[in-house]
Amino acid sequence: MARIIEKIVNTRLVWLLEIKILSNLQSGFRKHRSTTDNITIIKLKVNNVLNSNSYLSLISIDISKDYDSVWRHRVRERIVINRLQIGHTRLTDKFLMIKEEPPQCPFCEVILTIKHLKTKCFKYIEDAKKNNILSNIDEALVSITEYINNMVKFLRKTHLLNQI
């Protein structure tokens, strides 16, 4: 029932946006319209102007540099913390996608899990203690800045950050 209502509301909202709000020149992320349509229109206008020896005013805004200020490392760290919170990481769950056996910890010879790496693995237990990583994984992953920062430090130090 909820999906039917959602579909009805979505259809009405899309209709409202298409008819009443969005300009015909707005093309990105719209059905049957593409940003390449606008590029084609500009190209046609430029060609017409060149053929008729007239003038065309064109204003272009380069927004590519706007995304240079995004702190990519912090975004990556947030993605890793979210993966740890839901319990699915590339390091521990990749085997599901490639249809292999679960990975084994090379140091302890048990099935590799985040809980194992953080609380039981002989190689990482000292680093976890030094970074105040709690033994209860749920407590360590609550949205408290100190715990998150400690977890990120631990993952960096152990070189696990890019594997998760």
Image (cartoon, grey):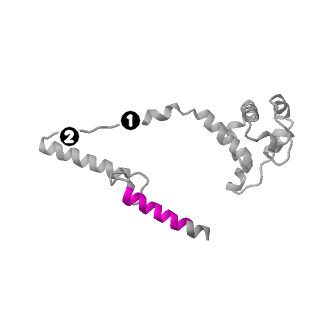
Q: From what the image shows, is residue 52 above or below residue 95?
A: above
Question: In this rendering, would 61 be left or right of 69?
Answer: left
Residue corresponding to mark 1: 62
Where residue 32 sits in the image (x, y, percent)?
A: 38, 60
The circle on residue 56 is 2
The circle on residue 97 is none
- Which residue occupies 62% across, 34% down? 74
Question: Mark 2: which secondary structure?
Answer: loop
Q: In which quarter of the image is the N terminus?
A: bottom right
Question: Mark 1: which secondary structure?
Answer: loop
Q: Work out how far the residue at label 1 is from the one at label 2, CA to CA, in angstroms.
A: 19 Å
Q: From what the image shows, is residue 125 above or below residue 38?
A: above
Amino acid beneath label 1:
Asp
- Which residue occupies 66% across, 39% down? 78
- Which residue occupies 32% across, 49% down? 38
Q: From what the image shows, is residue 101 above or below residue 145?
A: below
Dot 2: few (<14), some (14–19), or many (≥20) neighbours within 10 Å? few
Does the magenta run of residues contain 14? Answer: yes
